[in-house]
Image (spheres, rainbow, N blue to C red):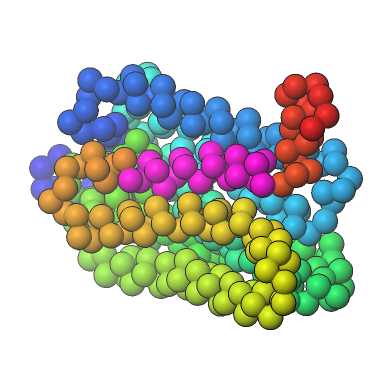
Amino acid sequence: MGSNPHNSSELPPFTLTGLPGLETSQHWMFLLLGTLYVVSIVGNALILFIIKKEQSLHQPMYYFLSLLSINDLGVSFSTLPTVLATFCLHLRKISFDCCMVQMFFIHFFSFVESGILLIMSFDRYVAICNPLRYATVLTDTQVARMGISVVIRSFCMVFPLPLLLKRLPFCKANVLSHSYCLHPDLIRLPCGNITVNNIFGLFIVISTFGLDSALILLSYILILRSVLAIASWEERLKTLNTCVSHMCAVFIFYVPMVGVSMAARYGRHAPQYVHTLMSLIYLFVPPMLNPVIYSIKTKEIRRRLCKILLGTKF
């Protein structure tokens, strides 16, 4: 393309990348990613099916878990087309508009997941610190409002991203670093002034991931203070055990995110496949592990799952 700027409306397709330097391992990589996709999609679909069928699970905690499973399915399906095309079919071209759509949904579901983890921490706070008010605070109407507010917030935060990119001229080789479209990757390609894009990107990260993680930490500080007031060690452990699944979900969501950010900032000299693998972990591991964690830690889900898979009661 040389150095001639192109408006986004006349851009040639972007070129997706598999694992730079590991071209001979692309088929094995697709086999691994395909397995993660199957576990994620089947696992989250089973969680939704079990919660719908099991009347004892029709309560706020499991409504939030349903939202998390729906969101994880969204994450999986938003990356599936281009990952399949890149690693299996060796089709590496994607149009500008399709790339913008995929970028929107990937980041939208990431913001939604952060919001869902926040309201799940609020659920645990109310259940442990104010158990007598749980039924009156977390009514079905309130649960619906909280879920809708998370979706609206995420949409409002992500919607400007493709519009801000679309206004910029592009004059560099349109080669992406991943097998899907991410904003930090796309923002490297324009040759115009990206100050507004950078400022807005920093703003939405701080006002969503930063704020959500701080409030989740605060909720667990309050929960821990309430638990330490319990006299019996056995009761303390029993109470904290109700938070283990959520703490694991928070851990597997935020730790890879921080790792990707640190690698982008301080690992500039690391091989490109390191950044690609860390990005894959961030997008693939949470949707795959969340249903596994909740299936193991939740007795009702585990019992119903064993009944479905083995045809026996557990």
> Main SS of the magenta segment?
helix
Tell me the quarter of the image containing the N terminus: top left
Compared to residue 270, the image places residue 98 above or below, namely above
Query: Picture quarter containing residue 149?
Result: bottom right
Does the magenta segment cover residue 251? Answer: no
Q: Which of 102 and 42 is in front in this view?
A: 42
Tell me the quarter of the image containing the C terminus: top right
Viewer can see residue 120: no
The residue under the point 45% across, 58% down is 254
From the viewer's perspective, tell me whether residue 132 is left or right of residue 217.
Answer: right
From the viewer's perspective, tell me whether residue 64 is left or right of residue 116.
Answer: right
The residue under the point 86% across, 69% down is 135
The residue under the point 41% across, 57% down is 255
Query: Picture quarter containing residue 178?
Result: top left
Residue 13 appears at what percent x and percent y?
31, 35
Range drawn in magenta:
278-297
Residue 297 appears at what percent x and percent y?
66, 47
Viewer can see residue 251: yes
From the viewer's perspective, tell me whether residue 174 is left or right of residue 218.
Answer: left
Compared to residue 119, the image places residue 14 above or below, namely above
Query: Picture quarter containing residue 191?
Result: bottom left
Q: Which of 236 and 204 is in front in this view?
A: 236
Compared to residue 181, the image places residue 164 above or below, namely below
Residue 131 appears at what percent x and percent y?
81, 73
The residue under the point 83% across, 29% down is 313
Compared to residue 263, the image places residue 91 above or below, namely above
Q: Nearer the viewer, residue 206 or 223?
A: 223
**Number of numbered tags placed on the structure image:** 0
Residue 36 appears at what percent x and percent y?
49, 31
